[in-house]
Image (cartoon, helix red, strand yellow):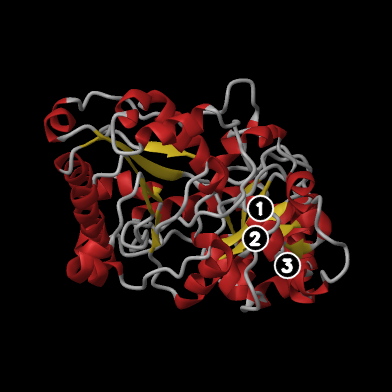
Amino acid sequence: MLGALGGEGVLASEIDPHARDVYAQNWGIKPEGDIIQLVEQHLDRVPEHTVLAGGFPCQPFSKSGYQKGMAEHRGMLFHEIVKILKARRPAVVMLENVRNIAGPRQRETWDAIIGGLRGAGYRVPSDPCTFSPHLLPPQRGGSPQIRDRVYIMGTYVGRRRSRKEVDIEPVVRREPWPGWDPTSWDFVKHVTSSTPRSGLGKYHITREEEEWILTWNDFLVRIGDAPLPGFPFWSSYWNDSAQVDRHAPQWKQYYEQKNIDFYRAHRREIRAWLRANPQLRSFPPSRQKLEWQAQDSVRDLRACLIHFRPSGIRVKKPTYSPALVAMADTQTPIIGPLARRITTGEAARLQGFPEWFEFGEQAESKTYKQLGNAINIGAAYHVFREHVLRDQEDIAATLDGSALVQAVLTSSDCPLLTRPIDDVGVG
């Protein structure tokens, strides 16, 4: 992203040794390991720079974690970023994290982040800037993936102004680019177009997975034209004796009752399906659940995008996929029409990585993990560019800010990446 604007990286930090190797291979810089130790003991080794781009660990704020926020050691990394900002005063700071960092359970954390940046002299909005790459058309760097991330954009204006100029709006709203319809995405066309046809056998679904798909497809056939509700199907409650567990959390009781009601409304069809598919009860519990999120698509899992999640089999339209996650390769999306998982190359394309980017000889599970943790290049560039265009006068007045503004003004909407940028680097 920044390399495409003519920027040159001067320092990077990454605690994962495998990710450091990949970064060095593509970027030419061996990232520092523990940024906390570097800042606390050798802050003078942090060079002057125009932009600080950071993605401090998201696990303390993610819904999939414990949501301890700043109370968790990894959440404290933000304080080291503030120390660098106070020492070097780069013209622009761009931070990225999961959407939940600005959620109601992290209100105290969010206020601390905004307060810390303003205390370092950066003008930042009080409201989060949330954006996803599927909201951009391909010619502007978009990709068919719902990946809502919070981008915290700040411009150095000094502490007096940063504490006074607080009534500013996020530079980008979570809405489609004018004239673009996100449902126009075609996942297969935009992600798999340049994938070689050979050597894909290891990505094909297993016989067991195929059985799960065919079993639930039979359910869709037998249910006919009956409306498919938005709640997840829990087949374990599809029997005459099922009752709501009054000791369960309220949210779970709600779904239990919804499934019991659905069974009673379609008892004849469901019982016929259960008799015809006794293998269902031998499936893992999570595979006895279906989350149909494909709305009015053809009622065929093989025509959709499939995600085998711990919570159930999630099915979506073949337009754009759920967000890539930093999990084993078994958790990657399955392209129904191709009966296989996406490859690492396709996952990289989904994140906006250029075709020349190399992950070396590391295990694919590590590559999937790194891509699941990566920033989406197209979405990040869009947010960054709009921020620089809006604040160009203040940016140009700071250090080498004028060169940055000129680079953005003369760039295209989505420039060809000539070198990668890591979301935990300083450049």
Element type at mark 3: helix
> Badge 3: how crowded within 10 Å, few (<14), some, or many (20+)?
some
Residue wearing tag 3: 212
The relative height of residue 13 versus residue 364 in the rendered view (above or below) is above
**Do the residues bearing badges 1 and 2 touch, measured as CB atoms within 8 Å?**
yes
Please state which of the two labelled residues, at mark 2 or mark 3, is closer to the viewer.
Answer: 2
Q: Position of residue 415 (x, y in %)?
A: 61, 38
Q: Which mark is residue 354?
A: 1
Element type at mark 2: loop
Can you tell which quarter of the image residue 57 is in?
bottom left
The relative height of residue 230 versus residue 202 in the rendered view (above or below) is above
Sequence-wise first label, 2 or 3? 3
Residue wearing tag 2: 357
Residue 285 in view in this figure: no
Q: Is residue 354 left or right of residue 378?
A: right
> Badge 1: how crowded within 10 Å, few (<14), some, or many (20+)?
some
Amino acid at dot 3: Trp
Towards the viewer: 383 or 320: 383
Q: Residue at x 45, y 37 (%)?
A: 384
Please state which of the two labelled residues, at mark 3 or mark 1, is closer to the viewer.
Answer: 1
Towards the viewer: 287 or 20: 20
Sequence-wise first label, 3 or 1? 3
Towards the viewer: 301 or 184: 184
Element type at mark 1: loop
The relative height of residue 210 versus residue 96 in the rendered view (above or below) is below
Amino acid at dot 1: Pro
Towards the viewer: 335 or 45: 45
Q: Residue at x 36, y 73 (%)?
A: 33
CA gap, disc 1 and disc 2: 6 Å
> Badge 2: how crowded within 10 Å, few (<14), some, or many (20+)?
some
Amino acid at dot 2: Phe
